Image (cartoon, coloured by chain):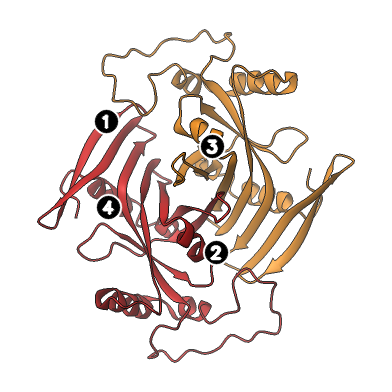
Chain colours: A red, B orange
């Protein structure tokens, strides 16, 4: 994990300061489509993966971004805080944890994320194919609350390698770059730059 | 311009409903870097270019995105409204209008955008190179208010060809696709899709 005085500390403080706003969990993820054009959408931030700096989200295996990730496994998050005008641009590698995952710790992470999801959110994964023409006759299935993650449910993580922090009110900008991993701690460079 | 019942109407109504919120002018633009990775940042929406559906912004010729656009002239805007949870994903072509622009109407647009900018915003274009290590001894120059646009000042426009509208509260999603231009009016297809 990133150390003290890090982007992670500044980000956590921004999240704390905006906790009263429901939309403070909403951020934007940019990816690259198969045709090389950019894509951008709002995601709900589900916290950091325990013991790491990876940002966690949930997504549907049938969504376009899961296809995009096969061509370009990189993403950039723009996390903007509406009260303080602080912006975090987090660039890094994406990882998709789906129903065919073999890694035991990732399988556990996915199951946990499923049970942490609201009934409404879980039901969305049993809904008709996202982006397909509206299915009018569809009836929302009732999911058994004790049932584990269904096949379409995925956890998406972004592991940041570069963080561009900008405080637009103070005109203050800092670039953080991941350098190395030592004894489980991430080493980052930190440089104040012109806004 | 897009016709009645269009994405443009829905977007203008969302903007109107969020007018009391300063951050309702803030949206995120995704582009693709020269190395093929995505980039994402917050921009201030400056309205539509008169008589068109192009979204207008200002940017510094020294910013990374002007370089990125040379490799990939496409962008995707994610415009998210925090009260109603409405999201507009606007995908289209980017155009940069800088100091060497020859097209007379674009030159006029750039000059107008300069004089529409606040003194603070104008001064930022005379500031040290964005993203370079912080210049501590720098003194902000005073710009003559009657002086025209300085070289670093650019207008950036995005001409949408596809708009993915999603109302997350109502679970309502519509895909709009640009088809053709007829007598100065844009023809768009409109299809309700699964969220």
Q: Which mark is residue B71?
A: 3
Task: Work out how far the residue at label 2 is from the one at label 3, CA to CA, in angstroms.
Answer: 23 Å
Q: Are marks 4 and 3 on the same chain?
A: no
Q: Residues within 10 Å of mark 3 (few under 14, many from 20)?
A: some
Marks 4/1: CA distance?
19 Å
Side (left or right) of A152 relative to A45: right
Tell which of B122 and B16 is nearer to you. B122
Under tag 1, what secondary structure? strand
* Whether label 4 touches label 1, CB < 8 Å: no
Q: Secondary structure at mark 3?
A: helix
Quarter-of-image position of residue A48? bottom left
Q: Mark 2 or mark 1: which comes first in sequence?
A: 2
Could you say which disc has been placed on residue A95 in the image?
none
Q: Describe the element under mark 4 as helix, strand or loop.
A: helix
Front residue (pair B21, B174): B174
Q: Going 57% across and 67% down the picture, which residue do you hit? A: B169
Judge depth for marks 2 and 1 and give the one in front: 2
**What is the x, y in percent for residue B19?**
59, 44
Q: Which residue is mark 4?
A: A12
Q: Is residue B168 above or below residue A125?
A: above
Residues at marks 3 and 1, CA–CA distance in whole angstroms? 28 Å
User: Is there a contact, CB below 8 Å, between mark 2 and mark 3?
Assistant: no
């Amino acid at each position: 994990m990133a150390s003290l005085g890090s982007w992670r500390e500044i980000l956590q403080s921004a999240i704390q300061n905006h906790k009263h706003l429901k939309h403070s969990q909403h951020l934007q993820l940019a990816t690259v489509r198969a045709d090389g054009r950019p894509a951008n959408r709002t995601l709900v931030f589900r916290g950091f993966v325990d013991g790491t700096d990876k940002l966690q989200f949930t997504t549907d295996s049938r969504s376009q971004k899961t296809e995009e990730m096969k061509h370009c496994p990189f993403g950039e998050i723009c996390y903007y805080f509406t009260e303080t005008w602080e912006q975090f641009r987090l660039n890094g590698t994406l990882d998709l944890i789906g129903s065919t995952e073999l890694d035991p710790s990732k399988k556990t992470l996915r199951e946990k994320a499923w049970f942490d999801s609201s009934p409404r959110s879980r039901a969305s994964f049993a809904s008709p194919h996202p982006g397909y023409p509206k299915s009018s006759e569809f009836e929302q299935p009732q999911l058994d609350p004790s049932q584990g993650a269904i096949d379409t449910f995925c956890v998406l993580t972004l592991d940041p390698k570069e963080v561009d922090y900008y405080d637009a009110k103070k005109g203050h900008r800092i670039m953080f770059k991941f350098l190395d991993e030592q004894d489980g701690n991430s080493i980052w460079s930190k440089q104040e730059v012109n806004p």
